[in-house]
């Protein structure tokens, strides 16, 4: 009993001694406090510290367990069997049918974009169209129909950029439907070619011979979508041993949010219109495709329709050449609705244009009201320093308005035209429905009273 008391006394004395050192050694201004008060203060402090330490250890342990189980669940979900993944997708499709429908669409490039139709081969030309915020589905449809009749799909791929995060579903439906109808018309004419020796034996709303080639020559597979294995099934029913085969390009689309996810110009403008934001999306896209296309055309689908082939003028030009047109016969004002050139020249122009937009919208610039595509393009066209990296050719001829052509002549005019105030959608429909095979494919022709050929 005495030894126990003695050990307790010694232990207590050691504790007091340690407390004395911990409390008094670092502080030189407490020499006048009583020893008894110091000892009580030290014991309370040690007790509180022990409780705080215990609580901290408990919290850390709980957090570690949560992180540990989260990692386990993440690992298990990553290696989830295919049937469970299929069950999840089916549940998702039942809860969010629109989302699941979008997920089933094939991506166009590097898991981005939408592949509407995969072409039969790789193309040298790219028609890159941006869709402004104010563009309607009717304008999108009329642009597609004019594009199909122009024959450009036989020489180029068609790419749309939409002012949204991804391609809108209602636009997807219009593009896919119009493309399927046109390909159906092509197949019908190809069947006719199998029975007749000349294309001129039957009339068509477009030059059929551009889409039907003889022989087996191919320029390789398109860059869009998954590659088709040799001997695999393609999205068209032609047999390579036939004397004729179809030749047409791919149709794809991207949301501007996929190409410019950070909205690069948002730090310079409160609202970035599609007319300016599209220039922030071009560097990534054209840089990725720089080895796939020789010529590029930039088009505003709301302002113009393509009834001809503007790329014909640049196919023999240098890769650095860029061709611009003036706006309403005003030489200083460049029309941004149609820009054509070599892929290198258009890519460098887009980079210079993006730099010019940033320069014009910096906080110290007091002339932000002048930040328009036409103004900036006109400035670049007159900049001798910029012209060292690409060669700009400004045409004095402006783009004519569709209403100046009149009637059915719209559909047969081999040129780019501005929409203006014309009802070009109605005129195109009348022209298409005046041909027998087209009238049997397009359901709208049942409402149009025309005499087919």
Image: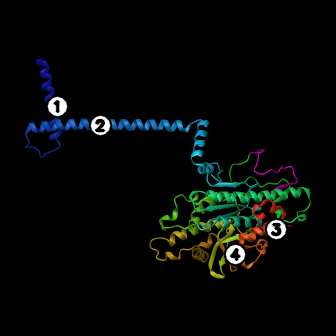
Mark closest to the chain's N terminus, 4 or 1 = 1
Q: Nearer the viewer, residue 183 or 288?
A: 183
For marks 2 and 3 on the same chain, the one whose residue lies earlier in the sequence:
2
User: On residue 434, which mark appears?
Assistant: 3
Tell me the distance, in whole angstroms, between the alpha carbons under discs 1 and 3: 107 Å
Q: Which residue is mark 2?
A: 55
The verdict on residue 231 being magenta is yes
The earlier-in-sequence mark between 1 and 3 is 1
Q: Position of residue 5 (x, y in %)?
A: 12, 21
Which mark is nearer the camera, 1 or 3?
3
Highlighted magenta segment, given as a residue range: 229-247
3D distance between C-alphas at marks 4 and 2: 77 Å
Q: Is residue 26 in view from this perspective?
A: yes
* Closest to the observer, 25 or 127: 127
Of the numbered discs 1 and 2, the one sitting upstream in the chain is: 1
Q: CA distance from mark 2 to mark 3?
A: 85 Å
How far separated are the C-alphas under marks 4 and 3?
20 Å
- Helix, strand or loop for disc 3: loop
Extreme residue in the top direction: 1
Tag on residue 15?
A: 1
Q: Which mark is residue 256?
A: none
Question: Which of marks 2 and 4 precedes in the sequence?
Answer: 2
Label for residue 422?
Answer: 4
Density class for disc 2 (Cα within 10 Å; few <14, some 14-19, many ≥20) is: few
Report the predominant secondary structure element of the magenta stretch: loop
Could you say which quadrant of the image residue 8 lies in? top left
Kindly indicate whether the residue at mark 3 contacts the one at mark 1 (C-beta within 8 angstroms).
no
Earlier sequence position, callout 4 versus callout 3: 4
Residue 205, image x and y in percent?
81, 66
């Amino acid at each position: 009993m005495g030894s126990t008391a003695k050990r307790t006394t010694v232990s207590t004395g050691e504790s007091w001694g340690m407390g004395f050192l911990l409390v008094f050694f670092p502080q030189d201004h407490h020499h006048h406090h009583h020893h008894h008060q110091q000892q009580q203060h030290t014991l309370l402090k040690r007790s509180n510290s022990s409780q705080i330490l215990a609580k901290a250890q408990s919290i850390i342990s709980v957090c570690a367990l949560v992180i540990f189980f989260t990692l386990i669940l993440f690992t298990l979900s990553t290696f989830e069997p295919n049937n469970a993944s299929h069950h999840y997708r089916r549940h998702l499709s039942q809860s969010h049918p629109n989302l699941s429908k979008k997920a089933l669409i094939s991506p166009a490039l590097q898991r981005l974009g939408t592949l509407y139709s995969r072409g039969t081969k790789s193309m040298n030309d790219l028609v890159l169209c941006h869709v402004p915020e104010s563009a309607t589905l009717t304008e999108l449809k009329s642009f597609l129909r004019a594009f199909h009749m122009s024959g450009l799909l036989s020489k180029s791929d068609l790419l749309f950029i939409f002012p949204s995060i991804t391609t809108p579903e209602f636009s997807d439906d219009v593009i896919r439907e119009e493309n399927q109808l046109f390909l159906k018309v092509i197949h019908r004419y190809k069947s006719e070619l199998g029975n007749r020796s000349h294309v001129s034996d039957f009339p068509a709303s477009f030059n059929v011979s551009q889409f039907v080639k003889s022989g087996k020559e191919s320029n390789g597979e398109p860059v869009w979508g998954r590659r088709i294995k040799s001997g695999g099934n393609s999205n068209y029913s032609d047999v390579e041993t036939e004397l004729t085969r179809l030749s047409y390009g791919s149709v794809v689309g991207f949301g501007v949010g996929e190409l410019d996810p950070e909205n690069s110009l948002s730090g310079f403008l409160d609202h970035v219109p599609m007319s300016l934001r599209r220039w922030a999306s071009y560097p990534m896209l054209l840089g990725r495709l720089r080895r796939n296309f020789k010529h590029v055309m930039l088009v505003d689908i709301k302002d113009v329709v393509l009834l001809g082939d503007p790329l014909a003028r640049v196919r023999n030009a240098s890769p650095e050449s860029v061709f611009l047109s003036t706006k309403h016969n005003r030489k200083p004002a460049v029309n941004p609705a149609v820009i054509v050139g070599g892929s290198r020249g258009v890519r460098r122009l887009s980079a210079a244009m993006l730099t010019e937009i940033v320069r014009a919208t910096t906080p110290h610039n007091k002339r932000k009201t002048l930040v328009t595509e036409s103004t900036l393009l006109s400035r670049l066209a007159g900049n001798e320093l910029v012209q060292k990296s690409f060669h700009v050719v400004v045409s004095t001829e402006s783009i004519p308005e569709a209403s100046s052509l009149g009637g059915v002549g719209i559909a047969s005019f081999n040129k780019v035209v501005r929409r203006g105030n014309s009802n070009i959608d109605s005129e195109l429909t009348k022209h298409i429905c005046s041909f027998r095979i087209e009238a049997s494919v397009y359901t709208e022709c049942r409402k149009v009273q025309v005499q087919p050929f």
